Image (cartoon, rainbow, N blue to C red):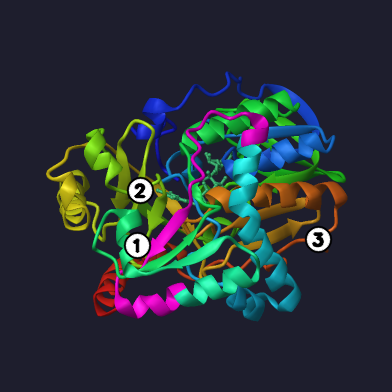
Amino acid sequence: MPESSALPPSLWAATAPPGPQTTPLAGTATADVAVVGAGYTGLSTALHLAERGASVVLLEAAEAGWGASGRNNGQVIPTHPRFDPDHFRQLLGPEKGEAYARLVRDSAAFTFALIHRLGIDCEAVQNGWIQPAHRPGRLALSARRVEQWAKLGAPVELLDRQRTAAVTGSDFWHGGWTNRDGGHINPLAYARGLAHAAIAAGVRLHERSPATALERDGARWRLSTPGGSVTADQVVLATNAYSDDLWPGFRQTVVPVRSYQMSTVPLGENVRRSILVGDVALSDTQGDLHFFRFARSGRLVTGGALVFHTGHETRLRRRIGARLARVFPQVGAVEFDHLWHGYVGITADRMPHLHELAPGVVAWVGCQGRGVALATILGREFARWVDTRSATDLPLPLAPLRPIPAHGFARRIARSALLLYRWRDRRG
Ligand SMILES: Cc1cc2nc3c(=O)[nH]c(=O)nc-3n(C[C@H](O)[C@H](O)[C@H](O)COP(=O)(O)OP(=O)(O)OC[C@H]3O[C@@H](n4cnc5c(N)ncnc54)[C@H](O)[C@@H]3O)c2cc1C
């Protein structure tokens, strides 16, 4: 991804506690497992592998949390954006579908438990996540989701219009549903906390160490960086939407779609208390997603997508400012003090893909914008997979590597899909 290796000017970069001090890889190193990419996937995988007794080197091109993990909205959401448990069973078969549904169900609780176990200071709030319906027609979706997740024992509940208004502090929505396992975090603080914990567990984390080549070395694999190389029995590629050409064709299996994030200046106490009552996190049913959560400082963190990026700063302030005034009139005219963006990884079938690229090289892509909890729990699954060398218990089937045809073009037109979403959003 042709971008600076500096962190974006996010609220999170301004407020997260510092990450660990690490040095770039120098000379030669050996490990049982080398992990590439220090977002939640790489950090959680490395941590869980080290806790299982493996020796692990973790290479990060920039710094821990530099990718999507340090730029996201920080909503911890135990659902898939598009599909529900019945879909998983249809798509993946009864066994894997059930296993994947359970993994998604458990993902938020697992993430908060991990934060608690490791003592990570990341503004963690587990007061629930709500998905309100933007049209009466979407209430059927809320009911279906509640029914299916409740059957799996998830702490979900349908909300009528009145309760939705009471919880959100807005008459904008028609009802919805909530999952009490959800919540929100400071995403960069979480990534940095995981990095500290991984190092404490024995992981050798090298930041500013982009892996530039991956080659066989006898029965092992060798990853090269500008300053050195690491030889390992197994390699985990945890580069997701920020993948480069380290493995031929891998980058082309996912379309990175730009999502903008912005934070208001801290809101007054009275206004703050009238919105997202109980400090829940919210993302609604629109394709042009409306999403909101508070940060500890009292800033409302929201954002959106644009079809064209020219003049994005001015246009976003106007567009999202108008959205806020529509949804939460009590906020009034408000300034935004941080604005940044990141890339969400979207696959062609909108499902995450697990790959065994070669014996001893594994990877996944495709968080579809819901990876805070999923990447964290998948890290645990990766660690077990790599440690036991058995894919039998994986909650997803292994997928063949299928580069998206005309990937460059797909990247360019992906954002035009937003026009279609907006049109659908208006129809219900
Ligand atoms: C703007 C935005 C908002 C989002 N909001 C939410 C949300 O509210 N809730 C939610 O659940 N999900 C959200 N997501 C999705 C979530 O952030 C991601 O799913 C998750 O962070 C993915 O983590 P990851 O570790 O797989 O990838 P990343 O965090 O992207 O990490 C990949 C890392 O790989 C490194 N890398 C790449 N190539 C190399 C190389 N050759 N050598 C070494 N390192 C390399 C990169 O520098 C990067 O740090 C959002 C995403 C974005 C972009």
Among numbered discs 1 and 3, the one appearing first in the sequence: 1
Q: On the image, which quarter does residue 335 sit in?
A: top left
For the question of whether residue 62 can be seen, the reply is: no
Horizontal arrangement in the rendering, residue 323 relative to residue 86 (left or right): left
Residue underneath mark 3:
391
**Amino acid type, residue under disc 2 in the picture:** Val
Q: Secondary structure at mark 1?
A: helix
- The quadrant the N terminus occupies is top left
Residue 118 drawn in magenta: yes
Residue underneath mark 2:
277
The residue nearer to you, when weighing 193 against 209, is 193
Residue at (58% x, 69% y) in the render: 149
Horizontal arrangement in the rendering, residue 65 relative to residue 326 (left or right): right
Q: CA distance from mark 1 to mark 2?
A: 10 Å
Label number found at residue 164:
1
Q: Is residue 93 above or below residue 317?
A: below
Among numbered discs 1 and 2, the one appearing first in the sequence: 1
Mark 1 crowd level (few <14, some 14–19, many ≥20, 10 Å Cα):
many
Label number found at residue 416:
none
Q: CA distance from mark 1 to mark 3?
A: 42 Å
User: What residue span does the magenta drawing correspond to?
Assistant: 116-142
Residue 332: % across, % down: 13, 45
The residue nearer to you, when weighing 416 against 314, is 314
Residue at (76% x, 34% y) in the render: 56
